[in-house]
Image (cartoon, rainbow, N blue to C red):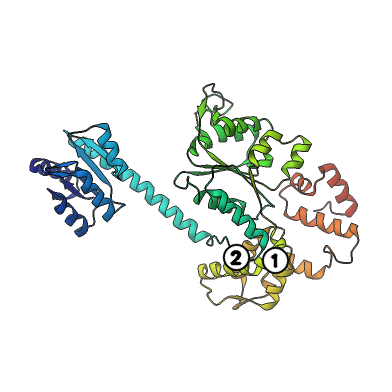
Amino acid sequence: MHILIVDDERNILRTTSLALNGMGHKTEVAENGRQAMRAVRGHKLDAVFLDLRLGHENGLDVLDQIVAEDEGLPVIVFTAYSTIESAVDAMRRGAYDYISKPFIPEQIRQMLQKLENNRRLQNKVTALESQLAEDNPAIDLTSNEESMRKAYDISFRAASSEASILLLGPSGTGKSVLARNIHSRSQRKEQPFVTINCPSLSKELLESELFGHVKGAFTGATGETWGKVTAADGGTLFLDEIGEMPLEIQPKLLRLLQDREYERVGETKTRTADIRLIAATNRDLAQCVREGTFREDLYYRLNVISIDLPALNHRPGDILPLAEKYLDFFRQRMGKPDTRFAEETRKAFIDYEWPGNLRELRNVIERSVILAAGEEITLDDLPEDFHEREESAIRPGYEVTLDELEQEHIRRILAKADSLEEAARILGIDTATLYRKRKRMGLLSK
């Protein structure tokens, strides 16, 4: 590292410089604030060691000047007049850390190791953020549809509050993206945003993932974990598809929301956590309450502010603008800057029902850009679903029987669901009823 040492005692400058040089670092020295600021402006520095007492100067004033000049430059303060108050004051003004005089070279070595570790972690975060930006189109929270503008307006106004927020809407409508945006506009934006996908885990694993566990709490618990609640302390916890949360865990979540208290699995010690909760679901939670699969008290605790995100086919004015934005992202990413939609493709997008919503739209555009042979994306470049809809006029509002409409709907749900159980849940029937309908309709092979 290239390090500046600021101290009015020349022997401190000399011995500290020798110690740092011996560790392989390059040093600059300054005896007062004027020399220090000249070094800060004239060199690309990685860190500053600053004495809080510089003769007749106050080192805190020099600290303020350094922070104003380069806010990201880590400043470690030295002080022989160390009091906790002066150290806290220095860190409140932007110091990275402090070392009390007299000090030994090992203390400096440890401080620089801490700084290097933090810098390495920050570089990883920056690299991950850069990769995430490359893999995903920029978030656009504008809309031509009144329903979406209303949803965004409520979320933006609620973001700065501490209230729990419940995001409602079908899968793929952008609930997780909106949750992150709410966090980024909140007073907790500098703190963690932690996500748990409730349906992806069993009851035991979900409870452990949320609250953590101690060693031996259950079969396979060979160590201890702290859980996502601890990770989100001070920040935001996002529970995706909360409607799938088992009843046994719901009272524990309610207690966390009401009292900020919880226990790890297998532990009796009560712990506290300060979190802001955002939850999302594609289920009708009010109906779940009536059916006894979701606690009424938890529902009302979550439903302080609810935001409905409509399905993509309920916001037709946004389909083509969103498609164009995805197209711009993928054609730049894939080196096809002149790729565009044929007029027939644009019309097909408007007519299509988009059962997978924004997620499906993104995937369709990516696939089409990859497969397009020429500069225009034609109907031939679109997935099979688009061609099936052209061949079949079985759509709501068309002159078809209810049986034909039901058969087509069940066929499409079966095609996109991961399992028969998921298909039955989406259709609102049990698996036995779904089996009978498939048998009657000749869909068992599917």
Secondary structure of the residue carrying tag 2 is helix
Question: Is residue 331 placed above or below 299 in the rendered structure?
Answer: below
Question: What residue type is disc 1 on?
Answer: Pro
Q: Are marks 2 and 1 in contact (CB under 8 Å)?
A: no
Q: Residue at x 67, y 67 (%)?
A: 317
Query: Is residue 9 shown above or below 152?
Result: above
Give the quarter of the image for residue 41: bottom left
Cα distance in 3D space between marks 2 and 1: 20 Å
Q: Which residue is mark 1?
A: 316
Q: Is residue 405 visible?
A: yes
Q: Residues within 10 Å of mark 1 (few under 14, many from 20)?
A: some
Q: In which quarter of the view is residue 166 placed?
A: top right
Q: Which mark is residue 216?
A: none
SS for tag 1? helix
The x and y percentages for residue 355 are 72, 58
Q: Mark 2 or mark 1, which has the lower sequence index?
A: 1
Q: Quadrant of residue 326?
A: bottom right
Q: Which residue is mark 2?
A: 366
Q: Nearer the viewer, residue 13 or 209?
A: 13
